[in-house]
């Protein structure tokens, strides 16, 4: 599967800064979710949005560099080949100008039927919107 990279601009809020003066680690998870939702809603059609839900089962985060209130960040995200109802998403949170990576994230998502809330196989139509 050749996947397109989706770029999501990040705005650092003052409330994202912790007592150590840098972006709190938990905020990276918020950005992961925001980027994933923005990516999905930018590629999915109305029927896909109505019939499907994504839920996270796992996050793996490697924090490589601290971000501060004046950091200019972007999230670059892509998905890999699905396995049944499971899909892995990768996100690099990086400097918007130099592309220095601040955090590397791998998340595992499951596709659910929006009515039954049960896992469902990721079909070719969904695979195609990400490639």
Image (cartoon, rainbow, N blue to C red):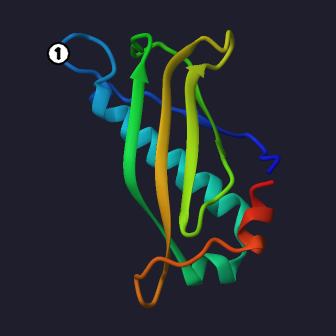
The quarter of the displayed image where residue 27 is located: top left
Left or right of 45, for residue 17: left
Q: Where is 70 relative to 90, above or below? A: above
Q: Where is 128 relative to 24, above or below? A: below
The quarter of the displayed image where residue 62 is located: top left
Number of callouts in the render? 1
Left or right of 117, for residue 49: right
Image quadrant where one finds the C terminus: bottom right
Q: Judge the density around disc 1: few (<14), some (14-19), many (≥20) Cα neighbours within 10 Å.
A: few
Seen at 48% across and 33% down, the residue is 105
Between 31 and 63, the residue placed more toward the observer is: 63
Q: Position of residue 81 (x, y in %)?
A: 69, 54
Seen at 74% across and 40% down, the residue is 5
Seen at 69% across and 59% down, the residue is 42
The quarter of the displayed image where residue 22 is located: top left
In the rendered image, the residue lying farthest to the left is 19
Q: Position of residue 88 (x, y in %)?
A: 56, 49
User: Which residue is label 1 attached to?
Assistant: 19
Between 8 and 89, the residue placed more toward the observer is: 89
What SS does tag 1 mark? loop
Between 13 and 56, the residue placed more toward the observer is: 56
Q: Where is 101 relative to 56, above or below? A: above
In the rendered image, the residue lying farthest to the front is 83
Seen at 48% across and 64% down, the residue is 110
In the rendered image, the residue lying farthest to the bottom is 115
Q: Position of residue 41 (x, y in %)?
A: 63, 62
């Amino acid at each position: 599967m050749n996947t397109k990279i989706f770029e999501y601009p990040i705005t650092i809020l003052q409330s994202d800064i912790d007592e150590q003066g840098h972006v709190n680690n938990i905020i990276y998870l918020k950005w992961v979710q925001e980027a994933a939702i923005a990516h999905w809603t930018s590629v999915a059609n109305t029927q896909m949005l109505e019939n499907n839900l994504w839920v996270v089962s796992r996050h793996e985060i490697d924090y490589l560099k601290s971000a501060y209130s004046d950091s200019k960040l972007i999230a670059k995200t892509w998905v890999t080949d699905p396995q049944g109802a499971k899909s892995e998403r990768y996100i690099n949170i990086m400097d918007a100008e130099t592309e220095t990576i601040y955090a590397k994230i791998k998340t595992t998502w499951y596709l659910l039927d929006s009515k039954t809330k049960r896992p469902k196989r990721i079909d070719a139509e969904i695979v195609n919107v990400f490639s």
